[in-house]
Image (tube, helix red, strand yellow):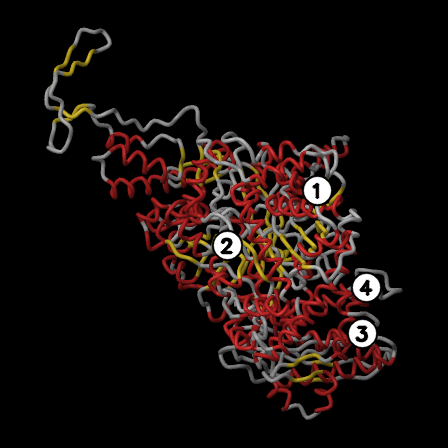
Amino acid sequence: MATPKGHEYECQEVELGCVGRRRNHHLFISFILFNGRDFSQFVLSLSIFLISVVLERESGERVTMAASSFSATSYISKSSIADSSFSSEHSKNLLLLKFKLSRRLRSRGRNFSVTNVASRKQLQKSPDQSVQKETTDTSDNGILVPDSKSVISSIKYHAEFTPSFSPEKFELPKAYYATAESVRDMLITNWNATYNFHEKMNAKQAYYLSMEFLQGRALLNAIGNLELSGAYAEALRKLGHDLEDVARQEPDAALGNGGLGRLASCFLDSLATLNYPAWGYGLRYKYGLFKQLITKDGQEEVAENWLEMGNPWEVPRNDVSYPVKFYGEVVKGPDGHKTWVGGEDIMAVAYDVPIPGYKTKTTINLRLWSTKVGPENFNLNAFNNGDHPKAYEALKRAEKICYILYPGDESLEGKTLRLKQQYTLCSASLQDIIARFERRSGESLDWNEFPEKVAVQMNDTHPTLCIPELLRILIDIKGLKWKEAWAITQRTVAYTNHTVLPEALEKWSLKLLQELLPRHVEIIKMIDNELIDTIIAEYGVEDLELLKEKLKQMRVLENIELPASILELLVKPEEIPTVDSSEKKVSEEVTETSEDDDIKIKAKDVVIRAKVTFDPDPKLPQMVRMANLCVVGGHAVNGVAEIHSEIVKNEVFNDFYKLWPKKFQNKTNGVTPRRWLSFCNPELSKIITKWTGTQDWVLNTEKLVELKKFADNEELQSEWRKAKRINKERTVSFLKEKTGYLVSPDAMFDVQVKRIHEYKRQLLNILGIVYRYKKMKEMSVDERKEKFVPRVCIFGGKAFATYVQAKRIVKFITDVGATVNHDPDIGDLLKVVFVPDYNVTVAEVLIPGSDLSQHISTAGMEASGTSNMKFAMNGCIQIGTLDGANVEIRQEVGEENFFLFGAEAHEIAGLRKQRSEGKFVADPRFEEVKQYVRSGVFGTYSYDELMGSLEGNEGYGRADYFLVGKDFPAYIECQEEVDKAYRDEKKWTKIFVHVHQVKQQAA
């Protein structure tokens, strides 16, 4: 038997007998017995055999097939990847079998589908063209594309043979799971091919480590990227369901919360679309952050239940697991080698999620870790003795690591759990990455090549422990020396900073780290020593005050004494003979008295220096600064918007920037136009394609600029308004379903949806609404209609469970809504709606239907923002400050198409200083609105604490740190300009078109 070039197989013909309906009939099939190197060939042959068995059982036919050689190399249809997966003979065999089997099963009310990846050229070799016509359509790139008939077969197959529900009915939940499993079949084919190709090519691969991946629903995105929306819509219609209704059965994956996680998911989508070899790594949270409920008391939190029915998109990899250790001790051997022993051991088990690219077969991987221990850790004796908590203590201790995203960290237990989560992500991921590097390297393993094959990107400071963990593995396990391991680590790791807020620049207690990860603390101290040497080499020891300040700001270890060897170098006598004429001289006699008052030392013409001490402050905690560790341990640091990157360089890490200016760079965030325009806003997408004359804008957003020349075209404007109306009507239905409030699509939809935080200033927005409401109440009906444009003010976002002030803001918004929405004097002129449990799916409805979006953070505090990009992409006009990506969006759309207000970033420090000195004078309108809130018009709840945070000149939770009062007058005046613009329908639509042309960074 012929074999592919470069492969040698042990081949022999085997007779496989199976008893069909006719006992005297047997099935014979010849297939390859392989030597273990190419399992995929065995699987394919076995698939043919099994299908043949089913066929004989159904029909009584005897099927005989001869084995044929085929290539097991991967097939991806884009770029230079063009190896075929299967030979024409095997393709023909599978198609013939499928045709016969599906024909038999359909006659009995059943169906079956086999998905195969093969080229058009291979299919054309098949003599039976009717088989091809029966099973597939053929796309332009030569890949088999299922038609609605084969999709129906596949869905029916999974409904019957991969059941999660009882067989009697085919209702929406069952239809969703069967459909998702059908799509997953195609993804797995592409997924495996992509993996095999990357293994074969051994190209450098990027690994994106993030505590969050805010994916949203996967079904519509997957079939959209596969260009199968039409086939699946038709198939489900024939099966009695609407695709949109089926898609609504899918819960959002509870793996993230805000922009950090959504950016990570957009990156994976774009990496796959651009055919980059890349993987994501995260944790598989069982209960997510929380599901938000809105009650009369404000926000309430309950656990997410997204995994209760199972997740059809994930593939458990029970053969991929790694040990993760906590606690224990470090033992030093006779040869000086250190080993981390004892402690608590758990296992991190891989769950893989396919991430398909758009118009490409490239499908990359998101690997999520779940934690457990083996059954031997279940204490059966304790259980039988009635001590049940003790019996499963070890199991629960391991499992709870992946229970909750961002568990509350007010307690020591909460801090410990968060640190365990971060280390689990880093340790399991790096062990997996290193194992892959070793496997691909084979006998030519060279650790110095590791940075040439591996790039680890840390999404914020949560994965910082990658740095000491990589060093630990290289030194303790792989046997490298410190210098070599340190150089490899620095060349491999890079860091994305996402905010300047203190809580994001994480610090961990040295004591906690020492207890939980003793070996890593030793390594971190060695990194700190490296940094100290670098700082001393840069600044010298002549000016000890300067050196002390640099060490204080830059060290990884905070408030921890310097190593003894360094202290010996830095200790100086108090009096040093003058060596520089520029130094201050003492002309009078100086007397220094010893403790016993017996010794007097006289000195003239000497420099008097205050003694510089480097002792830690015993009143302050000893901490490890993770952001500093990221900067020191990586080769690149990026901000996520131009203004943010400048703040990172000039303020947050200025000392590091002066030391290593080439490390720092800007990478403005982006979002994928597939999910955030093409799929979620099909009405507008059709218009864009029509007027640009191409669908290429879905991959190349630069082409959106073509719309600019049609901005004044009345036909385009009319079509644009019709699309917006359709989306607003959809939003009306959605709001009624989720909140019970019925709003008018004729009103302006004014939206602020994002994580609830004081710096994002939802409080400024709702105070502006209160001011608007108060003025309406003071007017007659006619005056109101003349003065104000009807508005529906929509909020959405979660306040962290322990963030009291943010939860007060949610309560305030809902109370205002409850009052305003039931006021018969106001009617449809003003509505306030808080959408509970804001997530990706909610955003996909609200964003296309929005007229105005608010991005009003205190200038200099929002790193970038990505919701501003999503709104702009959907032609939504923006009001905002010069903060984050707002700056670049305003540059793109034109100043006249962006409603700007507020203090700028360079003014903020001075304004806070002015406030602390008691020089700030509040605008009378601001005082008026606070007094109105306190009057009780919005209920009996006391808002003294909330209003009090906007008052005073100093103190925690006081003094209006986020400058709501300072920007309030400019904000309400800017909103008046918005009203004026909205009244001019043509002008407003023209702005829509201009705003839509924002180019996105993520492809």
Q: Distance between the residues labelled 2 and 1?
A: 27 Å
Query: Residue under circle 3?
Result: 237
Q: In which quarter of the image is the N terminus?
A: bottom right
Query: Residue under circle 4?
Result: 172
Q: Nearer the viewer, mark 1 or mark 3?
A: 1
Q: How far apart are marks 2 and 4 (CA)?
A: 39 Å
Which element type, helix, strand or loop, lies under badge 2?
Answer: loop
Q: Which of marks 2 and 3 is in front?
A: 2
Label 4, residues with CA under 10 Å away: few <14, some 14-19, many ≥20: some
Q: Which of marks 2 and 4 is in front?
A: 2
Task: Choose top left, top right, bottom left or bottom right for residue 356.
Answer: bottom right
Which element type, helix, strand or loop, lies under badge 1?
Answer: strand
Q: Which of marks 2 and 1 is nearer the N terminus?
A: 1
Residue 593: x and y, percent?
20, 11
Name the amino acid, label 2. Ser
Label 2, residues with CA under 10 Å away: few <14, some 14-19, many ≥20: many
Residue 244: x and y, percent?
75, 67
Q: Earlier in the sequence, mark 1 or mark 3?
A: 3
**What label sits on residue 864 in the rendered view?**
2
For image coordinates 50% across by 54% down, the residue present is: 864
Query: Residue under circle 1?
Result: 299
Residue 939: x and y, percent?
74, 37
827 is higher (above) or lower (below) than 158: above
Give yes or no for contact between labels 1 and 3 (Cβ–Cβ under 8 Å): no
